[in-house]
Amino acid sequence: MTFEFKTDCACQEYFTKSHDMVRKSVREFIKKEVLPYIDEWEEAGTFPIEIYKKAADVGILGIGYPEEYGGTPGDIFYRVAVSEELMRSGSGGFCAGLGSFNIAIPPILSLGTDAQKKKYIPPVLAGEKIAALAITEPGGGSDVANLTTTAVKDGDHYIINGSKTFITSGNRADFITCAVRTGEAGAKGVSLIIIDADTPGYSAANKLKKTGWWASDTAEIFFDNCRVPAENLLGGENQGFYGIMINFQGERLALAVMANMTARMALEESIKYARQREAFGKPLTGFQVTRHKLADMATLVEASTEFTYRVAAKIGAGVDQIKEVSMAKNFACSVSDKVTYDAVQIFGGYGYMRGYLVERLYRDNRILSIGGGTTEIMKEIISRLMLA
């Protein structure tokens, strides 16, 4: 019996020939500039800064951003296609590091002044500067509304004190979009401000060592009487929580896409291995238990991918999807949890060995249900909106 699974994500309902052209361009970039070196970068815990410029030069970084800032406008599925093909690198850490600007730039785009946009967005889309988002704090985790990093007005500057942790691209970022407290306790006292990394009082700790996402730079950032121009404030004082919530919708969609691609690649690797690996005189696909496991994995991947695409389409159409994107993220992560687990099981001992893609996918997968809001936070959002 032959087990077939179509791995082409370019569903005709959502993707056009133009999307496919972008997908092909990113695929070629990954094949040429990333895949020959990704294992080395993973072991080194970093990738060359030059990759940002190379990605920008072929138009990858600017996809979905306004032309006036150096981007290439397009609907939401251009960004989905780019994300899926970047994940073909087999390294969630590489994708997270290269794409950290995708969570740092949107608040500037939605809340920033013309001057802020012109100053900070074009160099990032050109691959000349690196941007990061700094929200999470050592004592806060997902409790964004109660962050404690303070920004006190002092003339035409803010004096910032506090710290952030788990910041992707935190060590190499040229600037961060940072959440600070400018007012009362709770969500109503939160603001967003842009902080340049060369500001006196700003420092980033050594890279944090993680279970997965090895190729990404993850850091703690400290502010010690960090004096930042008031003109760097995004929107008005105490309006930052709104910007953070808007940003989360895009981040959660991106994480759902990453989870689906993690699961898809784990499934593809499992199918290839099951066809080649023999046990008791026949390939693993000769055993019903293996075929049925693969069938269950494929069903979950297809269902999760379609759900994510549908939510993306509605977001792209301007429909509020806060509840649904939280559902999509949770479902995609639960699917990826199971599929990567089952993939390692199919590989047996080899699935636990470095050098096999499923081993890395299994490790990298674990952060997806934590980042961008934990599974538990997603359930709280879903239940509150259901019962409102």
Image: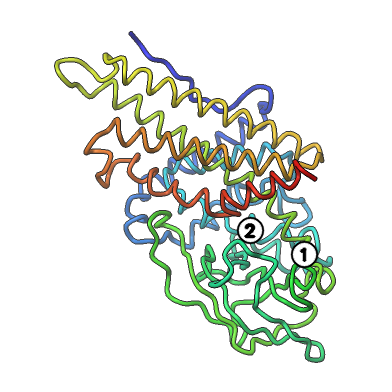
Residue 74 percent across, percent down from the top left: 73, 40
Between 61 and 105, the one lying in front of the other is 105
Q: CA distance from mark 2 to mark 1?
A: 14 Å
Image point (61%, 30%), residue name: 20
Instruction: Say if 114 sits above or below 314 in the image.
Output: below
Asked if marks 2 and 1 touch (Cβ < 8 Å), the reply is no
The type of residue carrying mark 2 is: Ala
Q: Is residue 360 left or right of residue 160?
A: left
Instruction: Say if 177 sits above or below 382 in the image.
Output: below
- The residue beneath circle 2 is 126
Residue 258 percent across, percent down from the top left: 53, 43
Between 18 and 280, the one lying in front of the other is 280
Instruction: Say if 149 sits above or below 33 in the image.
Output: below
Between 243 and 326, the one lying in front of the other is 326
Callout 1 secondary element: helix
Where residue 117 is drawn, which disc sits there? Answer: 1
Q: Tell me where residue 383 sits by quadrant.
A: top right
Image point (29%, 23%), residue name: 274
The type of residue carrying mark 1 is: Lys
Residue 264 percent across, percent down from the top left: 47, 32
Residue 119 percent across, percent down from the top left: 74, 69
